[in-house]
Amino acid sequence: MTALRRRLAEAEAAVTSFEEAVAAASRSAIERDSAILRLIYSYQAVWKVCQRLLDERDNIEIASPNDAIRAARRLGWLSDEDAEAAMKIGADCNLAAKAHLAHIGAEISCRLPTNAAVLRRWLTALREKAANIEQLMPSDTYLLFEWAMVQRKQIVCMYEGYRRELCPIILGHSRGEERALTYQFGGGARSKLPPAGQWKCLWLFKVRNVELREGLWYSGSSHITAQSCVETVDLDVNPDSPYKPKRRLASRPVAEPAGSRRGPAPPYRPGQA
């Protein structure tokens, strides 16, 4: 996973979480402060993507958020209006240290929807420019699945009308489309989910409302039948993957908690999602 791809994944996860906080119809003081915190780390993540992209694409070294904004504006990655708004986001992040003062917290809170929209447009522009570096620019969903694999986080999402709770195991492409082999341990499906969970093969363009969360990692204990879900494997959580993934993850064993009711995963067998 290149540094640019890693930063894109981090920024996508950060901005998505910020947008979720902003979407709340009303916010308590605690929820407001949480949203402001998400603004801070989202802004940090997006300008770091810009910094890396400027270095890799245009050999421009910058050391501060404002320098990144000026360079992005000069290169046409930000409109004049969005560049000015991005500068104000930086000011809001600095002002956030005083958000406990009611009038300052309320002032920053009023600008959160605008700030979220600006960060989303900036990140989208950066991803488009990164396409000149990456042969295949991944979708937002792909980046979130990739980040879940790197961080060993569970995913909750909607797929074909059912809420799925799963862990992504193999990520890549089939027939030119993004695809993932996952282990679903909770939620629903067209057929009843066995108590121990079941392997599921997902087309990522059908995945909606992706959320990452902490929790026990389910990766299965055996693959008696070779997987046929992902034709071109980009990433496999198995550090000894036999599928020749383009990138490998370092081994990160996760202990089974005492008293777990779930047994080892069944062998992988192709089936319906």
Image (tube, rainbow, N blue to C red):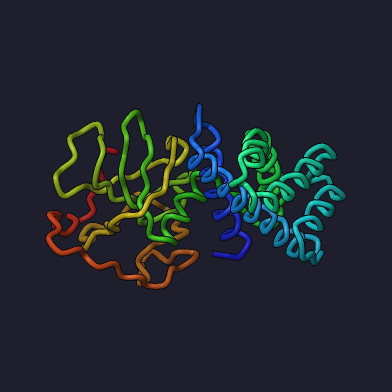
In the displayed structure, 44 sits above or below 114; it is: below
Q: Residue at x 62, y 51 (%)?
A: 40
Q: Nearer the viewer, residue 128 or 32?
A: 32
Percent coordinates x, y for residue 142 in the rendering: 49, 48
Q: Residue at x 50, y 33 (%)?
A: 27
Residue 207 sits in which quadrant?
top left
Residue 193 sits in which quadrant?
top left
Percent coordinates x, y for residue 206 in the rendering: 43, 35
Percent coordinates x, y for residue 41 in the rendering: 59, 53
Residue 223 sits in which quadrant?
bottom left
Q: Nearer the viewer, residue 106 or 44?
A: 106
In the displayed structure, 214 sits above or below 242; it is: above
Judge from the rendering whether residue 176 lies leftward or rightward of residue 125; answer left or right.
Answer: left
Number of numbered discs visible in the structure rendering: 0
Judge from the rendering whether residue 45 lies leftward or rightward of residue 199; answer left or right.
Answer: right
Percent coordinates x, y for residue 153 in the rendering: 38, 55
> Quarter holding the N terminus?
bottom right
Judge from the rendering whether residue 82 lies leftward or rightward of residue 111; answer left or right.
Answer: right
Q: Residue at x 60, y 59 (%)?
A: 7
In the displayed structure, 212 sits above or below 6; it is: above
Q: Residue at x 45, y 68 (%)?
A: 248
> Quarter holding the C terminus?
top left
